Amino acid sequence: MRHFLTLRDFTKEEILEIIDLGLQIKQNLKSGIYNGELKNKTLAMIFEKSSTRTRVSFETGMFQLGGHALFLSNRDIHLGRGEPVKDTARVISSMCDMVMIRTFEHSMIEEFASYSKVPVINGLTDSYHPVQLLADYMTLVEHGAHKNIVAAYVGDGNNMTHSWMMLAAKLGFELRVATPKGYEVDAKILQDALEIAKASGAVIKTMNDPKEAISGATVVTTDTWVSMGQEDEKEQRIQAFKGFMVDDEVMSLAQEGAKFLHCLPAYRGYEVSEEVFEKHSKIVFDEAENRLHAQKGLMVWLDKQRDM
Ligand code: CP
Ligand code: NVA
């Protein structure tokens, strides 16, 4: 049995296999073919933070695969009132076939997984957002932009950045990360990614200059400056991130035809300008839709591992 907590635990081949499976299931859906791969199975979805895409995509995906999803906010279950994670894990995994969790500390999901009898999927923690990266890479494949990637991430050194670092390290592409001073990526995760990169040939560079990161990039991406749980730091962050907006001026430094990705929700006038966002809205909303397809591939893949 496998859990999907970070891309770190997956090989390049496995990541590509999951995406490929997602693309096949997407093709089936578009042709009106439903194979009921997860018929009679249930997915428990624990949300300790808000979500639009993650909830809609997992719930819809599970239904389309013939199964059922349970939405469990921490206001509804005893976890939110102090029932231990390890007890919650043992109860839920005795009844459900898979669990998706969106939470704060990454250690919570690790603890849950260590007590779970069924696969656990990370639907975002403070440290990582790996399901988003499956959708992002799937989108690059569909847009023919997955070869010789030189990616630039401009903004906060957060869960999205860490997952981009893991994807680059595993797949072996170049990633430049530009953050303001004081908002750099987690040093331990960077070390880890650099170690993995040695084997794949990935080049991962961190810097404080967005222009340096974007120059010649084939893929440009960013994320909110204020992640969930950081609302109290909003004003201070807006000051610190001045000069880090992806606008037409910096975007013009990227390679001709460079793709822009955003995990959403997007805050125009902060991490991205209205113009850049709207110019690239087709690919950004393909990326959002691909959450559904990539995660269906992931759930079917994880379910298959249990049968092996
Ligand atoms: N990108 C993403 O995870 O969106 P939600 O927070 O809406 O789920
Ligand atoms: N970094 C953002 C991602 C939202 C999908 C957050 O954690 O809020």
Image: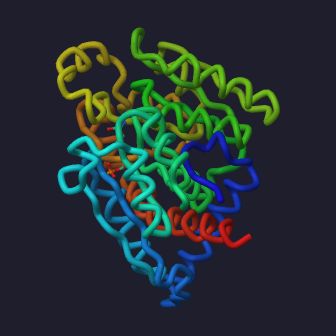
**Residue 69 position (above or below residue 276):** below
Question: Which residue occupies the extreme top position in the image?
Answer: 181
Residue at image position (58%, 19%) is: 188
Residue at image position (43%, 73%) is: 42
Say if residue 70 shows up in the picture: yes
Give the left or right position of residue 18, taking residue 208 as reference.
right
**Residue 237 position (above or below residue 260):** above
Q: Identify the image quadrant of residue 43.
A: bottom left
| Location of residue 141 in the rendering, given as x and y in whole percent from the top left corner | 62, 58
> Which residue is nearer to you in this view: 82 or 52?
82
| Location of residue 18 in the rendering, given as x and y in whole percent from the top left corner | 64, 62
**Residue 241 position (above or below residue 161):** above
Give the left or right position of residue 99, taking residue 264 as reference.
right
Residue at image position (26%, 18%) is: 237
Q: Quadrant of the N terminus?
A: bottom right
Residue at image position (24%, 51%) is: 78
| Location of residue 71 in the rendering, given as x and y in whole percent from the top left corner | 29, 63
Q: Identify the image quadrant of residue 271.
A: top left
Q: Identify the image quadrant of residue 175.
A: top right
